[in-house]
Image (cartoon, rainbow, N blue to C red):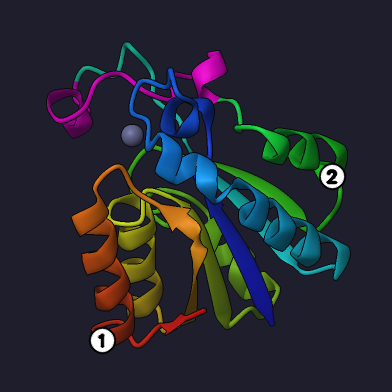
Amino acid sequence: MRALLSIDYTNDFVASDGSLTTGAAGQKIESRLVELTKDFIFKQEFVVFAIDGHETSDLYHPENNLFPPHNIMGTDGRKLYGKLAGIFESNKNKANVYWISKRHYSAFSGTDLFIRLRERQITEVHLTGVCTDICVLHTAVDAYNLGYKIVVHKDAVASFDPAGHDWALRHFKNTLGATIV
Ligand code: ZN
């Protein structure tokens, strides 16, 4: 069984005026990311939106010293970007569509993702979203450590750091044994 993990494709990470944006690189993957998401939803496969959610009051978060404020709860910056927003809105009540608010890079960190995947006997996770070398990477490492087969869709992941993006794709393949499609 397969699941699609849709990571952090929000205004702050993708829109031109987003606070931590991947810009053109992130915007370029929109149509492929949307196509894949629709495909998984319509095939009744599990689709998880794993989305960064920060609070301005969270003074102890290590990201405070690393990045500008981003994906603050309740802001437009945290809303899904472009056509993905509509796909989520019109399918969010389906049993195979699930939203996770995550506080760390990895979709597994401090969330119930592992349990949700186990319940559905999912053994293969398909990774999409941003940033290739941060949240997608950390999610992939945790998936690897938990024994999942990993598929990374190279036309549906992006980063603001082209060198980091290329390095992460090599790492997925050569170190995590992922299939890159
Ligand atoms: Zn964050």
Disc on res. 74: none
Q: Residue furthest left?
A: 65
- The residue indicated by pointer 1 is 174
Please tell me whether residue 67 is drawn above or below residue 47 in the rendered image. Answer: above
In the picture, measured across the screen, residue 1 lies left or right of residue 77, that is: right
Q: Amino acid at mark 1?
A: Asn
Q: Nearer the viewer, residue 162 or 91?
A: 162
Most frequent secondary structure within the magenta stretch: loop
Whether 101 is among the magenta residues is no
Q: Is residue 80 visible?
A: yes
Around disc 2, counting alpha carbons within 10 Å, would you say few (fewer than 14), some (14 to 19), or many (20 or more)? Answer: some
Q: Could you say whether the residue bearing mark 2 is in a helix, strand or loop? A: helix
* x, y percent for residue 159: 34, 48
- Residue 105: where, in percent of width, then height? 33, 47
Comparing labels 1 and 2, the label whose residue is closer to the camera: 1
75 in the magenta segment: yes
Label 1: which secondary element: helix
Disc on the earlier residue, 1 or 2: 2
Residue depicted at x 33% and y 12%: 56
- For the N terminus, which image quadrant? bottom right
Question: Which residue position is annotated with label 2?
Answer: 91
